[in-house]
Structure formats: C-alpha cells, structure tokens
Amino acid sequence: MASTPAAMHTEHLNLAYGERQIVEDLSVEIGRGQVTAIVGPNGCGKSTLLRSLARLLKPAAGGILLDGVDIHRVPTRDLARRLAMLPQSPLTPSGITVRELVGYGRFPHQGLLRGVSREDREAIEWALNVTDLGDYGDREVDTLSGGERQRAWIAMSLAQKTDVLLLDEPTTFLDIHYQLDLLNLVRTLNHEHGLTVVWVLHELNQAAAFSDHIIMLKEGKVICQGDPRLVMTPEAIRTVFNIDCCVIQHPMGAAPVCVPNSLCPLRQRLPATSPTVLMPN
C-alpha cells in the first residue's frame, strides 16, 4: 500500500460490463501527492478501473472513496471540483482556441447565471502558463501538434483546480520526444503543485521512471503494488506480462529498467560494429 495518506482508495471493488466481470475484489490506495501508475496487459482492466475512479462506471460491488467519502454520494459539481479526468484521445471541438478549450475546465465553478469571473480568468491563465502554452491561447487547437494538443487538454483539466488528476494513456499516439515532454510536465506539476496523479501507462519503464507507486493488474486483479524499485521484479513481470526479463538500475538514476531476455539472441547474432551517426548540415 502507499506509504502516504490515501487521497483515494477502493474497497473490494467489482466492475463489470453487463454480465462480463472485469475487475474483481480490488482494494488499492492512491497516495496523496503521489504519482500512481496502473500497468498491465491489454484487457486487464486498467482503463476500466480509471473510469470507475472518475465515476464514469458504477461498481457492481464495493466502494470508491475520495478523502474517506464514497464518490457516488458526492454531488456531481462538487466531485468535479475535486477530481479531473482526461480520457484517452479526447475529441476536440472544431474551430476552438486553446484558451476556450482550457476555459471548459471552469464549468464546475460557474453557476447557471454567472459569467466568467476574475477567478476563472486567473485559473485559465495559470493553467496555460504552467503547461507552457501562454503564447498559444489564441491559436486554434486544430493547428497544434499532437504533443501541444495533449498539453492543452491537460491545461483544461488543471483549470478545474482539483487535487486529483486521472489520465488514461496520455502518451498514446505521441512520438518519444512528446511522450517524455508530457511525462516530465506531469511530474513537474506533481512536485511543484502537490497534484495527486493516477495514470494508465503502457510503457513499463516510463511508468517506473515517472511514478512513485505502481499497481500491476492482470485479469482484473492486483498482482502487486508499491514502490517501482520493489514492484519491478523479473518474477512480477513474468507473472503479469508473460515475458522473461532482467531488471537493471538506470545508469542515470535509481529507476528500475526492464530488459526483455528476448532481446539477447538478437544481440548475439549481430556483429559488433560502430554506429553510424548522421548529423544535420
């Protein structure tokens, strides 16, 4: 379990789509002020669990508590002021500017008869600035690169001014540069603003490097959870992902790195040659 006080936790959670059971008797804790990664093979229930944490899927049994209160007993507007969810590949309205998109994050704070307040404008500008989009406010979202567009969506979530941010595979369809850019952004937001983050990540080494806590799922059940340095073991990875690997320490830090053993035969077959590096003119 997480070593810090829990911002959220589940109690014997069961999740299903109709008759199909996805998650069974799942109890996990989300440490306050931590970055928690949910990892596992395709179809193991990662995104289903995240959707349930955002109250987008009602449990078949068990409970989900935010600060000790069942989220299904919290009024929708109040919950949206405390928890933000960014789904995988959200659809962008056509012709909208970055500032307008970010402004959508202020809806939970606005009444039916109240326009945009000074507090709203300050929150929007803050979200733009902390995501390095301060100069992009008047640009249409459709004109942004994939990485910039993902930053804009994160800025919208930040404008909600919540303590908890849920991200479903935020690096999907991004190249490695923008993946690392986004991962570093979220880690910075966590460090500098105390944001509690839960994200679903496919890349195990990125999850280990950028998260404080890892939850490994297989077939809707928790196989192990805890500090990446303790959870990332060859035995756990073999159980969850059905691959043999070795786990080494990253040469630039303490993060564990999974190296599949299947790479070794390829290495042995290739002659040792110096790499060819092409430099731009």
Image: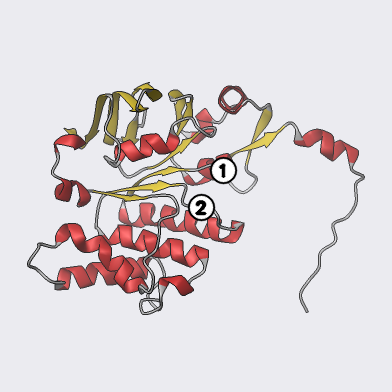
Q: Residue furthest front?
A: 18
Residue type for callout 1: Glu
Asked if disc 2 and disc 1 are in contact, CB closer than 8 Å, the reply is: yes
Q: At which x and y percent is residue 124?
A: 27, 69
- 257 horizontally vs 2: left or right: right
Q: Is residue 250 at all visible to an observer of this figure?
A: yes
- 29 horizontally vs 274: left or right: left
On residue 28, the disc is none
The residue drawn where x is 56% and y is 43% is 203
Residue matched to label 2: 171
- 235 horizontally vs 96: left or right: right
* Residue 32 image-quadrant placement: top left
Residue matched to label 1: 203
Q: CA distance from mark 2 to mark 1?
A: 9 Å
The residue drawn where x is 87% and y is 36% is 268
The residue drawn where x is 45% and y is 71% is 142
